[in-house]
Amino acid sequence: MDNQAIRVILADDHPVVRTGIRTLLQQAEDIVVVAETGNGSEVFKLVEQLAPDVLLLDMEMPGLSGVEVAMRLKEKGAVVRVLALSAYDDEEYIRNLLLHGASGYLTKEEAIEIIIDAVRGVARGEQGWFSRRAIAQLSALSRHEANPAKELSNRELDVLRLVAAGKTNLEIGHTLGISEKTVEKHMGAVFNKLQVSSRVEAAVLAVQQGLV
């Protein structure tokens, strides 16, 4: 196994679904499934023992729900990146996952064609991996109907577009010819003006407003 392979834990309570996703991921030479579980309560032990790069997390599991798992991982300061998998595109699920640090939200019916790319992207630190249905739900959130993106300066819009493209602050700085610290200042202004608290929310809003 390549030492640089992306290490994935798969948490889903449907054995058939797990088998299908594992089989798909095994087709990628740079991804390895190091463990799988059908119980939300078992995720913490596996994450602690195996230090995976990405956790593919189902929303509905016995023991603890996916939202509860993501919340506790964030509270524990776990560095694993969470990519949510769900049979639902429910607004509450999506919003809760965003609030608790998930890097993406894929509905299962759309996930197969993009799941490998999503795992790779999330492992690189990219945010905003959402299925079309999830983005459609987020677009319906009433608090963003006023188009707060109009308040952004041209430079802040440049930064936001690069965030939505999955770029890190360092990469954004290189692209725009500014320091990483300046990028961080612009990001703070973007978060404040858009009334969001994460890069994921900012990226989703950029998609909603047609900025990318």
Image: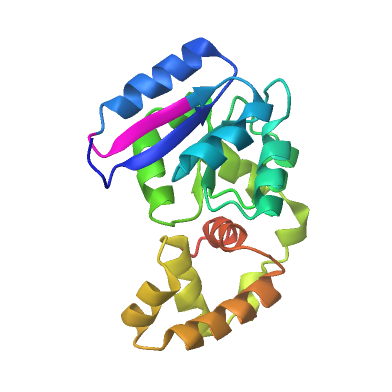
Which contiguous range is marked in magenta?
Answer: 29-35
Residue at x 71%, y 46% (from the top left corner): 71
Q: Is residue 64 above or below residue 137?
A: above
Quadrant occupied by the N terminus: top left
Can you give x and y, in whole percent of width and height, for residue 55 in the image? Answer: 51, 38
Res 100 visible? no
- Could you say which is closer to the camera, residue 124 or residue 176? 124
Q: What is the x, y in percent for residue 107?
A: 54, 31
Relative to 15, is 70 on the left or the right?
A: right
Residue 137: which quarter of the image?
top right
What residue is shown at x 77% (from left), y 59% (from top)? 143
In the rendered picture of this protein, how many numbered marks are placed on residues?
Answer: 0
**Furthest residue in direction front, as rendered:** 49
Q: Nearer the viewer, residue 138 or 63?
A: 63
Residue 15 is left or right of residue 151, and the answer is left
Q: Quadrant of residue 188?
A: bottom right
Asked if the stretch drawn in magenta spans residue 152, the answer is no
Work out which quarter of the rendered image holds the C terminus and state it: bottom left
Write the residue at 69% across / 76% down: 192
Q: Magenta region's main secondary structure? A: strand
The image position of residue 66, as x and y in percent, is: 67, 34
Give the residue displayed 52% in from the left and 38% down from the top: 49
Residue 110: x and y in percent read: 47, 29
Instruction: Decide: is 114 above or below 200.
Output: above
